[in-house]
Amino acid sequence: MKKQITSIALLLIVASTVISCKKDTTSLKAQMMGRWTLNRIVTTGYTADETLKDPTKINGDVTYGKTSDYVDYKSNNDDQVEISLSGNKTIGTYQIIYSDQFTMELNDGNNFCVVNSLNGNQFQFTATISNRIKKVYYLSR
């Protein structure tokens, strides 16, 4: 009898371990993980003075979509994000805040991001910098 109870207990432990080791596919981090093609960025909020001082700070709709244009959310423990725009790479970090919000620390500052839509092959989010500059990112796989 003792052998049967031990066998059943061992079986339950193994079964619960297998069930609990399911891969996370539903969290925001799991869905955004990996490399996305960057199709376009729509930017608003820069002043005329900022644009004159720094020509990279422009408002408007910029279309990308080449293989060198991507956003890659790394699966390492450092939560790194790599953004490549026309071959110019920027590496920063990202952090999940809520089920539909995250931040990205990049060379242009802290980007507070809200997910507009996310599915297996489309990802759109709005990043806000300094509470006034907005960038809407359109990504695909």
Image: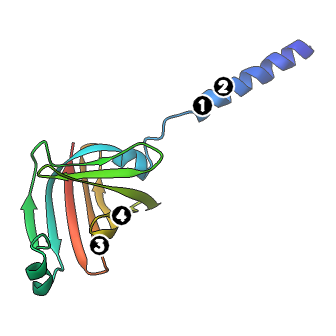
Horizontal side of residue 64 vs 97, given as left or right: left
Q: Secondary structure at mark 1?
A: helix
Considering every residue shown, the one lying at the far front of the view is: 53
Q: What distance separates the C-alpha of mark 3 from that of mark 4?
A: 12 Å
Q: What distance separates the C-alpha of mark 2 from that of mark 1?
A: 6 Å
In percent of width and height, residue 102 lies at: 39, 62
In percent of width and height, residue 133 lies at: 23, 77
Q: Earlier in the sequence, mark 1 or mark 3?
A: 1
* Nearest the eye: 18 or 67: 67
Write down the residue under mark 3. 128
Specify the amino acid type for callout 2.
Ala
- Mark 3 or 4: the one toward you: 4
> Label 3: how many residues lie within 10 Å, few (<14), some (14-19) or many (20+)?
many
Write down the residue under mark 2. 15
Write down the residue under mark 1. 19
Q: Earlier in the sequence, mark 2 or mark 3?
A: 2
Q: Secondary structure at mark 2?
A: helix
Image quadrant holding the N terminus, namely: top right
Is the C-beta separation of discs 3 and 4 under 8 Å?
A: no
Above or below: residue 9 compared with residue 95: above
Q: Secondary structure at mark 3?
A: strand
Q: Is residue 98 visible?
A: no
- Mark 2 or 3: the one toward you: 3
Horizontal side of residue 12 vs 62, given as left or right: right
Is the C-beta separation of discs 2 and 1 under 8 Å?
A: yes
Q: Residue at horizontal 65%, vertical 30%?
A: 17
Q: What distance separates the C-alpha of mark 2 from that of mark 3?
A: 45 Å
Write down the residue under mark 4. 105
Specify the amino acid type for callout 4.
Glu
Is the C-beta separation of discs 2 and 3 under 8 Å?
A: no
